[in-house]
Amino acid sequence: MTTDVSGLTRVRADRVRGIAVGLRHLRGPLLPILHAVQRDLGYIDAVDVPVIADVLNLSVAEVHGVVTFYHDFRRGPGGRVMVRVCRAEACQAVGAEALAEHATRRLGVGFGGTTADAAVTLEETFCLGNCALGPSVQVDERVHGRVSPARLDALLAEAGR
Amino acid sequence: MTGPVRVFVPRDSAARSVGADAVAERIRAVAGREVEVVRTGSRGMLWLEPLVEVATPAGRVGYGPVAPEDVDGLVAAGLLDGRGESLGLVEDLAWMRRQQRVTFARVGVVDPRSAADFEAHGGCAGLRAALAKSPAEVVEEVVESGLRGRGGAGFPTGVKWRTVLGAAADVKFVCCNADEGDSGTFADRMLIEGDPFTLIEGMTIAAYAVGAREGYVYVRSEYPDAVVALEAAIALARERGWLGERVLGSDLAFDLHVRVGAGAYICGEETAMLESLEGKRGMVRAKPPIPALAGLFGRPTVVNNVLSLASVPAILADGAAAYAALGTGRSRGTSVFQLGGNVARGGIVETPFGITLGELVNDLGGGTASGRPVRAMQVGGPLGAYVPVSQFDLPMDYEAFAEAGAMLGHGGVVVFDDTVDMAAMARFAFSFCAKESCGKCTPCRVGSVRGVETIDRIRAGVDREKNLVLLDELCELMTDGSLCAMGGLTPMPVRSAVRYFDEDFEGAS
């Protein structure tokens, strides 16, 4: 019944090392590596940091500093679907704050939170470049415009929530 | 006429955000005859999206906004022959006729995935003209055009290039700043999604002019469609010999790479962007040294905005004089303005500098989307001033805006109606700065937090007069003492809100 935790950790470390070795020839490879790890493994675990640091010959502190600087990099698992509500000025001008409040109420989590069933992670974002068709919401990589509370409910339903 | 009917449906992410993919799919499904659905960029008439165009002998006839469920009826009424209830010829629409498209000439017209289409519409002419000149002549051509940085700072592009050309180094770089994080701006995204080859061409010209062999485009992660479009175009450009060892058969060697940001607004600041490209935290560098002398990895580097670089091919193709003939005062050429927020007709307006704010918002934009009166416009992004309607006559040029205590920035105009709470917007400016500050300098890192607290006290009616004085002193300190524009300009929206909308700062009584 016990899971081989050290085995899983080793598998993950090998994956991360493989990604880092594959990209270390790039100029300034750290951000491309972190993006690739997150794409492949869902987030950047604390145990990934020394592996990446070792491959790039950086200190653990340097890599940790970069992971924590950028909003995009998650340090734990997120939900199956990522929902980002734009709260920048142009969307605020057409009701983004009411939509943001609706989203938190509907999902029962705050921004940065993940629903208890791990279905959705809700995040705020500041500008999706869809400023003439706001309020805008991004579901995974896809931007949706003119999102009313009812439309957000429909998008969440499509996403299985 | 033989061959399939050509139907154009934008692939631009704004058009997709309101259903363009489903519209394109439905047209293919119900056409009943051979059609070629070309996925273009957007014309920039975003309130008409999804805008469907059909090629006819007279020109392209437009239909929009088209919902997926409208398609069957439109096709039955003769859409594929340009008949039925249409908008008429797209080029003849008042919104289009009012504009003069130079940088955006091909956006919405061509297939951004087709190098042949790009070339058929005048692509590569600027690069060919550049390669026929010496690098120094190319630099002088850009200087003479009067082109100034479209990212917001307005520094003369050619002068920057001259510095990089004159710098001796083993390696030089050309970097394009496509970290378009300002709310209300989307022209960089639309150019990259709608005509990426023009950006590639502009960067290649820059590389030739300054002696660089390697270029990077830093695109924000919030723009996944732009990343895909640009990477596809770079791959095609390499196949065509527009990038690589011998560009267009010349001695120029230049290659281009895309790097994706990671959700940090500050990386739109050029030195923070360079740090990020190097794989570090996006911490602002102190200047000097300027990036033109010590930029990416310490090497001389051209850092230009997307629109600056994308304007260069036209300047080389048609000559500096033609470009400089447009515009007003020291603001030469055209600028790509972006209308967003609470506006009836939002989108892209490319005109020579000098059009007034009121013409943009009222004549082209049609006032608010809500139908209520316009109360304020924020021009130039989150660090730009809130401008009241009494300044509708302000001409859109760098100096006129600076004189009015505002800034043109990247050309974004966000419209607010009379329900806006300007004290809340001023508070937002500080809280955004607090969230996005890189933390390197104290005025920005700490000042922004103190700003939020001070506005909260003013709104709560606590020592209102004293706190307004404190707010003003804080703004002055941030303006004078911050390392970069983030902390240095956050006071601009705050102070303009207090100056023009002081009734919103009355506080609870």
Image (tube, coloured by chain):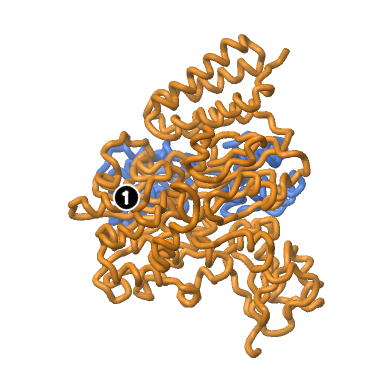
In this picture, residue B193 sits left or right of residue B442:
right
Q: Residue at x 57, y 44 (%)?
A: B395
Q: Residue at x 49, y 48 (%)?
A: B180
- The chain coloured blue is A
Does residue A104 lie above or below B339 as drawn? above
- Could you say where residue B347 lies in the image, as x and y percent from the top left? 62, 54
Name the image quarter holding residue B77. bottom right
The residue sitting at the bottom extreme is B2
The answer to whether residue A33 is visible is no
In this picture, residue A151 sits left or right of residue A126:
right
- Could you say where residue A111 lies in the image, as x and y percent from the top left? 60, 36
Q: Residue at x 50, y 65 (%)?
A: B195
Compare residues B293 and B143 and report the one nearer the observer.
Answer: B143
Q: Callout 1: residue from which chain? A: B
- The chain coloured orange is B
- Could you say where residue A81 lies in the image, as x and y percent from the top left? 60, 49
Q: Residues within 10 Å of mark 1 (few under 14, many from 20)?
A: some
**Looking at numbered disc 1 in the image, what kind of residue is underneath it?**
Val
Helix, strand or loop at disc 1?
A: helix
Name the image quarter holding residue B396. top right
In this picture, residue B36 sits left or right of residue B251:
right
Pick the quarter of the image with the N terminus of chain B: bottom right
Compare residues A111 and B224 and report the one nearer the observer.
Answer: B224
Does residue B458 lie above or below B168 as drawn? above
The residue labelled by disc 1 is: B159
